Amino acid sequence: MNHAKQLPEAQRQRCEVWTRVMGYHRPVAAFNPGKQSEHRERQHFCEAK
């Protein structure tokens, strides 16, 4: 069962998401709208060892 608690809205703050692009780590917020859309559509996976 998930008993996660949420903070009141006044205590919350945005989380900055970074990703690696062309060998550099960049904040997703710095992407243009098209690249941000592409980033949201990415599918994450775990590669088997």
Image: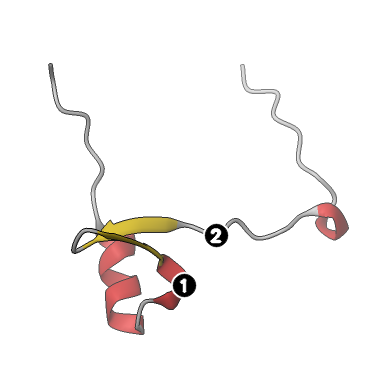
- Residue tagged 1: 29
- Residue at screen point 60% across, 56% down: 15
- Residue at screen point 36% across, 77% down: 31
**Residue 47 or 23: which is nearer the viewer?**
23
Q: Is mark 1 on a helix, strand or loop?
A: helix
Extreme residue toward the front, this view: 24
- Within 10 Å of disc 1 (Cα), the crowding (few <14, some 14-19, many 20+) is few
Find residue 24 and report its image quarter. Answer: bottom left
- Image location of residue 2, percent across then percent down: 63, 22
Residues at marks 1 and 2, CA–CA distance in whole angstroms: 8 Å
Whichever of labels 1 and 2 marks the residue nearer the N terminus, that label is: 2
- Image location of residue 36, percent across then percent down: 35, 72
In the picture provided, is 4 more to the left or to the right than 39? right
Find residue 42 and report its image quarter. Answer: bottom left
- Residue at screen point 31% across, 72% down: 37
Is the residue 33 above or below the residue 9 in the image?
A: below
- Residue tagged 2: 16
Q: Identify the disc placed on residue 18.
A: none
- Residue at screen point 26% across, 42% down: 44
Q: Is mark 2 on a helix, strand or loop?
A: loop
- Image location of residue 43, percent across then percent down: 23, 48
**Residue 42 or 19: which is nearer the viewer?**
19
